[in-house]
Image (cartoon, rainbow, N blue to C red):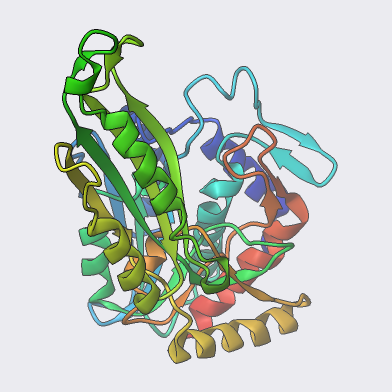
Amino acid sequence: MLDPKEMLEGIRRWVEIETPTSAPGEVARLMRDVAAGFADLGAGIGWIEERDGRGPHLELRSPWGGDGPGILILSHLDTVHPLGTLADRLPFRIDGDRAYGPGIYDMKAGAFLAFAAFRELVREGRETPLPLRWLITADEEVGSPTSREVIRAAGDKARHVLVTEPARDGGKCVTARKGTARYAIHFTGRAAHSGARHADGRSAIREMARHVLELEAITDHAAEITTNVGLVSGGTAVNTVAETARLDLDVRFPSEEAMRCALAAVEERKAHDGDVDIRIEGGLSRPPYERSAATARLYEHARGLAAEIGFELGETRSGGGSDGNFLADRLPVLDGIGIDGDGAHTLHEHMLISSMVPHAMLIRRLMETLE
């Protein structure tokens, strides 16, 4: 039987090793601890070493099942909270049914639930019909730049994908997610004195301002397309016509068709002032994760298992992306099967202790019944 005290202590141990994506040494420290726990259970261990200041990533496999296609469990252990958050603004603490801590909801507790489910199988001497494989990444919170190809490759040996991102809206799993794109758009005009030579100048900020309005106007809430100019910068002095400016843009879209329309509207930028140059960097970060027929069947299977356990499993679509986005176009992906709670990326981030056992049991039953 799953022991909630043992599970909570394990989650606490993982949370108390702070792992912002920007601190790969600390991420590696937790990864080594996690790998040791799996190794004690007979799991095979593989490493993808740190690259470009991100990583390492951890690959794990059950001691049974061989090399055939199996169940891929996707998790990440990097978090958004800076080092020192645990000691200062968000210490691990328990308040009733809530346990607080940096990254506890997104998504250390969910990753631990999958480990706990595997541990119970090993302790009971049980094997699953399909081999179990984990890919635990270290850069999901910044768009998975060094792990996305590893994720796609891991999908080549998978029949089903389970993503231990947190549950949503009171315990719902996720069966669709928006895709994301990120851009940095640079404007280069001509500097001039704002008084004596104003007519000689070509303002990059003025050009950028027109594009800010045009880019924001791409948003179509009915079509679930959003564009957000989140950062702007430019100029050198208040009495100088601005030679340079830059905006940073986030784009979200629910489908391939919406993606094509939105990205074309961004990438086909033309300057209003012919003397100002525009340079666009960036592009697609995560493709849209649409609810396929295979994913719908996987969800219905999970919903039936949850009913047997004693809770109702709903579903939802998320506006945020996950590593599941990289595989949903070719595999059934069930996301958001981790812990229930709230406050991801905030100073009130918490998990619901009462959701530990039922959600871990669901993960175990999926491991045991997917064929």
Identify the residue at image location x=54%, y=78%.
366
Judged left or right of residue 148, residue 62 is right
Identify the residue at image location x=64%, y=50%.
7
Identify the residue at image location x=24%, y=17%.
198
Whole-percent x and y of residue 294?
44, 89
Identify the residue at image location x=43%, y=33%.
19
Tell me: residue 72, above or below residue 45: below
- Quadrant of the frame with the C terminus: bottom left
Report if residue 35 is visible in the image.
Answer: no
Residues 79 and 276: in front is 276
Tell me: residue 227, above or below residue 200: below
In the figure, residue 362 lies in which quadrant?
Answer: bottom right
Residues 252 and 127: in front is 252
Residues 209 and 5: in front is 209
- Quadrant of the frame with the N terminus: bottom right
Tell me: residue 110, above or below residue 363: above
Whole-percent x and y of residue 284?
28, 59
Judged left or right of residue 45, residue 52 is left
Whole-percent x and y of residue 244?
23, 26
Report if residue 316 is visible in the image.
Answer: yes
Judged left or right of residue 348, residue 133 is left
Whole-percent x and y of residue 261?
34, 71
Q: How many marks?
A: 0
Residue lying at the far right of the rendered structure: 96
Residues 188 and 139: in front is 188
